[in-house]
Structure formats: structure tokens, C-alpha cells
Image (cartoon, helix red, strand yellow):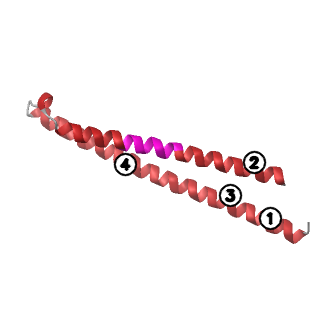
Amino acid sequence: MGLFDKVKEKASDALEQGKGAAQTQQLKLQLRKLEGEVEAAGAAFGAAAFDLFEAASLSTSSDLGALATRVRDARTAVEAKKAEITSAGEDDSDNESAGESAS
């Protein structure tokens, strides 16, 4: 293999690592957005619960059901995104290991 081929291979490896890092950062950005949604859903739930408590009708309300579902859904989305990030990190590790083995 010539010097040019080695340089080309190293550049290609660096490009792949950069793509993997960019993908991981994109996933982390999406995770932060989802965590913000969990916080907003929790705040809405808390505000609604407080209003019902102040009105002394907390136990008879069904308004909290929709908000509780929103909180649950947002938490599920966060956990799924965390799993996706973990999976992407494992994929990046696999790619790096394969690249090191080929060197």
C-alpha cells in the first residue's frame, strides 16, 4: 500500500469518527429537548394538581389523567433517546475498534 493510500485511509477513518461524533451530539441535543418536555409536563401536572387542591376537588378530578399521560409519554421518550444514544456510542466504539484492528 502506498503512502497516498494510507493517508486516504486515515482521512476516511477520521471522517467516519467525525460523523459518529456529530450524530451523538445530535442525539444528545434531542435528549435535552425531550428532558425539557418532561419538565414542562411535570410543571403543568403540578400546577393543575395545585389548583385542584386549592379548590378542594383534587380527588374528584379527571383533568390530571391527561397531564399524567403527558408526563409518562415524555419520560418514555427520554428513556428511548437515552437508549439510542447508548446504542450509538456502542456503534462508535465498535467502529473505532474495527478501525484500530485494520491499522
Q: Which mark is residue 36?
A: 4
63 to 6, vertically: above or below: above
Task: Determine the residue located farthest toward the right in the rendered image.
Answer: 1
- Cβ–Cβ below 8 Å for labels 4 and 1? no
Could you tell me which secondary element the residue under label 4 belongs to? helix
Q: Residues within 10 Å of mark 4 (few under 14, many from 20)?
A: some
Instruction: Give the mark, 3 or 2, whose residue is nearer the N terminus.
Output: 3
Q: Which residue is painted at 24% across and 41% down in the image?
A: 67
Question: Where does the magenta region start and end?
Answer: 74-83
Residue 85: x %, y % from top left: 55, 47
What amino acid is at disc 2? Ser
Distance of mark 4 from mark 1, alpha carbons? Answer: 41 Å
Q: Which residue is painted at 54% across and 55% down in the image?
A: 25
The quadrant of the rendering that contains the C terminus is bottom right
Could you tell me which secondary element the residue under label 1 belongs to? helix
What amino acid is at disc 3? Gln
Distance of mark 3 from mark 2, alpha carbons? Answer: 11 Å
- Give the residue pinned by disc 1: 9
